[in-house]
Image: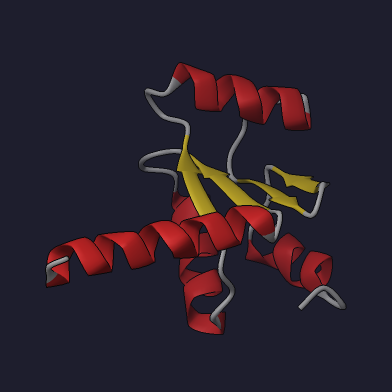
């Protein structure tokens, strides 16, 4: 296995770990609230699986089925859903969870 394959494999393992942790963030391309939330999560070192629903019909259907709406960002945190939010709503949502 070469270095590239090893890094790709490590990325896949990390993604699977995020999915197993039940942390999935649905985002849309060009969404300022999505970018703000991703930036916040990155700064805080909070790992999530990012799913971009823009141009992905199946991912959009999954998000709608989960949250009952089409707005992003939408977070599925261990089957607890926070939809159409910004960092102001995310911070209290995450209290006691991390």
At x 44%, y 44%, the residue is 31
Above or below, 79 against 70 in this view is below
At x 82%, y 73%, the residue is 97
Q: Is residue 25 visible?
A: yes
Give the percent coordinates (x, y) of residue 23: 66, 56
Position of the N terminus, as image quadrant, is bottom left
At x 53%, y 72%, the residue is 40
**12 sits to left or right of 69:** left
Q: Is residue 70 visible?
A: no
**4 sits to left or right of 50:** left
At x 55%, y 71%, the residue is 41
Above or below, 80 against 17 in this view is above
Among the 4 quarters of the image, the one containing residue 11 = bottom left
Among the 4 quarters of the image, the one containing residue 13 = bottom left
Q: Quick one: which residue is furthest to the front in this view?
A: 1
Count of all numbered marks drawn on residues in the image:
0
Give the percent coordinates (x, y) of residue 74: 65, 44
Above or below, 3 against 12 in this view is below
Give the percent coordinates (x, y) of residue 4: 15, 65
Among the 4 quarters of the image, the one containing residue 20 = bottom right
Above or below, 66 against 45 in this view is above
Nearest the camera: 35 or 75?
A: 75
């Amino acid at each position: 296995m070469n270095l590239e394959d090893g890094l790709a494999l490590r990325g896949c393992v990390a993604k699977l770990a995020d999915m197993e942790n039940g942390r999935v963030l649905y985002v849309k391309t060009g969404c300022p609230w999505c970018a703000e939330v991703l930036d916040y999560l990155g700064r805080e070192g909070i790992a999530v699986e990012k799913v971009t629903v823009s141009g992905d019909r199946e991912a959009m259907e999954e998000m709608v089925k989960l949250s009952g709406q089409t707005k992003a960002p939408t977070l599925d945190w261990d089957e607890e859903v926070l939809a159409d939010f910004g960092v102001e709503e995310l911070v209290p949502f995450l209290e006691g969870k991390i």
